[in-house]
Amino acid sequence: MDTGHHDVAQQHFIQALRMAKAGGAVDIGCHIMSNMALQALLRGYHEEAIDMVQGAYERARGRAGHRVLGFAKLIEARAHAKANDARAASAAIAASERCLEVADRDADEPAWIRYFTHTRLASDAVEVHRDLRNPAAAWRWNARADAMNPDSFARSVGLRLTVLATTHLQEHDLDQGLAAGHRAIDILGRVASARARDYVADITTTITPWHREKPVADFLHRAHTELAAVS
């Protein structure tokens, strides 16, 4: 998904889902469906994403590990936020947190899901509340996500900084928005990612009311030149 080749990704997801079903791997099947829902969400199909991830969660509930289920609820929260349903998004985040709180008790938790931590949840929650146009809540979650090391999680931290930039712009704070945007480019300029360019494009769209300002023109020049160099 990160390269922007969604058709190819979907083919691989479908093949992997068939293999998981054939092998009776409920955890893997749920995780694949959650990522397919995320792909649908990134392509703008939030209602489809909600249906997909809710179905994955219900089929896996009581059978999959808590961390796997928590990730599904996080993707559901992101989809509800895109649909502007604050109540459903908050409920899904709370459910995701509850899953994480008991995940360490799962004796046979698969190693591949351990990347999903409270810090990762907090990072995605910043975007959830940005989409709900609740910058104050986004900033509170960002304080919990700051533990992510940009050297180890360059793409994730860079994407979160683009989201943080747009929350400041929602509050008409151009200086803070540009500062976060420049930090994002500092990191994402080293990462080959179509998704990174899409996220920076969110800043360039949100910043339109200030397009005549020189600092904005400088930022746009950086975005176009430095991200294009790693495309």
Image (tube, helix red, strand yellow):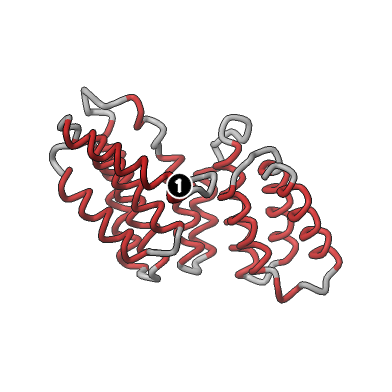
x then y, percent, for residue 76: 32, 56
Q: Position of residue 47 (x, y in %)?
A: 32, 66
Identified by mark 1, the residue type is Ala
- Residue 204, x across and y down, in percent: 68, 64
Q: Is residue 85 left or right of residue 231?
A: left
Looking at the image, residue 1 sits to the left or right of residue 77; the answer is right
- Where residue 33 appears, as percent x and y from the top left, is 29, 46
Badge count:
1
Task: Specify few, some or many for label 1: CA neighbours under 10 Å numbering under 14, 14-19, or 20 or more.
Answer: many
Q: Dot 1 lies on which element?
A: helix
Q: Residue at x 71, y 48 (%)?
A: 227
Identify which residue is drawn at 67% across, 48% down.
184
Q: Is residue 117 left or right of residue 15?
A: right
Quick one: which residue is furthest to the bottom in this view?
Answer: 209
Residue at the spot x=72%, y=49% of the render? 228
Residue 101, picture quadrant = top left
Q: Disc 1 marks which residue?
A: 122
What residue is at 46 percent from the left and 40 percent from the top?
119
